[in-house]
Amino acid sequence: MMMYYEIKKIFVKRGNRVALAVLAFAIIVIVYSLVSQTYWVNENGEMETGFGTIRKIKEAKQEWSGSLTENQIARVIEEKNRINATPQHQSEDMRQQEIAYSWTQGFQDITYLLNYAYGDFQTWDYTVADSLTPDMASDFYPNRMKSLKKWLEEEEGGANLFTDKEKAFLMEQYENLETPFFYEYQEGWKNLFQWASGIAMITALVLGFLCAGIFADEFRQKASAIFYSSYHGRGKAIWTKVTAGLLTVTVVYWAAMLAYSAAVLGIFGIEGSNCPIQSTMAGWKSFYQITNGQEYLMILFGGYLGCLFMTGAVMLVSAAAKSSLLAVTIPFLMIILPSLLMSMNSPTLNKILGLLPDQLLQISSVVKYFNLYEIGGEIFGAVPILAAVYLLLTFILIPMMYFTYKKHQVTR
Amino acid sequence: MELEIINLTKEFKEIIAVDHINLSMKNGVYGLLGVNGAGKTTFMRMLCTLIRPSVGKILCEGKDIFEMDGEYRKILGYLPQEFGFYPDFTVQDYLMYVASIKGIRQTAAKKRTKILLQQVGLSKVQNRKMKKLSGGMKRRVGIAQAMLNNPKILILDEPTAGLDPSERIRFRNLISELSQDRLVLLSTHIVSDIEYIANQILLMQNGKIFHSGTQEEILNEVPIRVWRLDVRKSEVEHWQAMYKVANLKTMPQGAELRILSEQCPDTNAKEEELTLEDVFLYYFGEKAGNNDDVL
């Protein structure tokens, strides 16, 4: 009964209802923008947008699904060269060029990978794939290693950014990546990852708003005297507040993320969950050996841990300072400050920023960064450290908020 | 039920809000009378375990209430001076929530809430949001929440403050009704509240309880008498400078003064019966609250 009313206190507030409506609206707008940005160029060189194009893209890309073997790479290069030689591609007429482009849409993802594999490590040149011949296909995977090695040796590249041990770790990770990659249509995951961080961040801010008053409102509304003078006022009733906060985080976070996931994957399809993240342009350089499906789980659980920690910090400030206004600023500071500091571009600062809690909300970016940390002679990526550190800190926050709130005296 | 207060003191930085109080209270209604800032609220908050004393102890049936912790609060009902609530909750929701933190099971809480809402005359507004209630209704919800656990110790801090006269009378009657077989401590700076319902009166000033007893005892022990004197309007200032004037009533032909004095102030003065209000004025003088409240 106590839990029911504690939860009701949160959701009965008009401001909190508005915050939830904002979250729901944000999800709808984001999903709508993902759909409206999807386009398909038809055989007449005309651009089509909207739901109908998704099926066409899927059909075209599924024709190129399978292992990205040397033969498959050679086939893509061959097809690319064949299209490049057509009068439509060489025409100066835009419509004709669009017609030529329409024939490349099925293997466009693989073309993007070619631009990375045969180009410079730090730049992406979209013309690289046009300069390849089928006999170069055997260099596709070795080039990934070579370009990293070269970049790690360059003074202006990664030579001064990493220790020898870290460089060796990166090389080993690249070397151990299972090849050939499995490739198939994976627009659902690509689109999902594109805004997953955004949704997690908006959810974290909304949760901060919802939970900022759990402790502080008792004082703001001058209800603390009755609260603390009641039988459970310095015990179970405080635990119920803590639990209500955690339950709110759990329900709102999972509802938001699963609603977003269901909408995006429902519209764009779930194919491609077993593809390694390196089989997409965004994940090509990543040293994490994971599939889209595994990245999705990491995003979900990372975001959940991030929201738990941030809301826990909000509740602790709310319990200590008895001010919901101060508490509600915590997620804003945790999310906005690191992004401001990131522009300073200092390697040491970046290492620190790589371990701040906002990173948990953007695992899809974290798995693409080369943020490495040495602990006990072993090199780790940021993800396992973030998970361990914030899991521990969240567990510490829980009793801290309880004891902080328990000790208050009611002097006003 | 017995509460024993031993050498109770509370200091806030350089201010001594409660100053070495020693007191024993048993079942009955105790009226704690004092001006604003006398230390009544701090004293009551300590009795409700909301503030820890700087020095001294509060014993309930011989046990320290801070060591008893939840077991003490289980038998406690408290209506604070500033009664806070959750504005978006309905009356029913509010009482059910307070019942839950008082450790009352849902079925019992529903029954108890229904009875109390009837008792305080709020059954018809049980589904109205708290923020939509009038000041008097909110105070009645306040007393209902304090009574939810059928407390053996009921502490009411300025329960009638801010109520209009009819609400105040109604509230006083309600408190009298609820005071059977329990220890009720009622603080106020409104003398009539005490006159009507308190068995014992505690007079508090500067953090100390300097006088206590029944209404008769207090009236008998005060070294003052009351005189009625009719004077010309031009003489009013003179008499006010000479004596404590409990009341000044302007008449067409002059003014009627109620003078506090041990000796007869004038041969025309007629002695009147001493009231608690006169005692209040005698002890607390000019600080004795605002005129509207001391009625």
Image (cartoon, coloured by chain):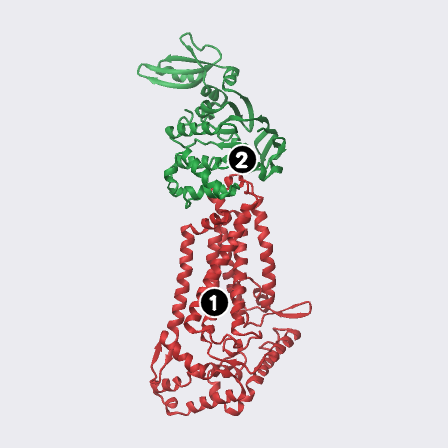
Chain colours: A red, B green
**Mark 2 or mark 1, which is nearer to you?**
2
Question: Could you tell me which residue is drawn at 49 percent across and 32 percent down?
Answer: B156
Q: CA distance from mark 2 to mark 1?
A: 51 Å
Kindly identify which residue carries mark 1. Answer: A196
Where residue A153 appears, as percent x and y from the top left, is 61, 80
Q: Is residue A242 left or right of residue A23?
A: right
Residue A410 visible: no
Q: The disc labelled 2 sits on which kind of residue?
A: Leu
The N terminus of chain B, quarter of image = top right
Residue B134 visible: yes
**Mark 2 nearby-residue class (10 Å; few <14, some 14–19, many ≥20):** many
Against B211, residue A107 (above or below) is below
Mark 2 residue element: strand
Mark 1 residue element: helix
Against B87, residue A125 (above or below) is below
The chain to which mark 1 is attached is A
The image shows a total of numbered marks equal to 2
Q: Is residue A94 left or right of residue A324?
A: left
Q: The disc labelled 1 sits on which kind of residue?
A: Ala
Kindly identify which residue carries mark 2. Answer: B76
Where residue A146 appears, as percent x and y from the top left, is 59, 83
Q: Out of A115 and B285, give the one closest to the viewer.
A: A115
- Using the image, tell me which numbered label, if any, was put on residue B79: none
**Mark 1 nearby-residue class (10 Å; few <14, some 14–19, many ≥20):** many
Residue that lies at the very extreme toward the top in this rendered image: B267
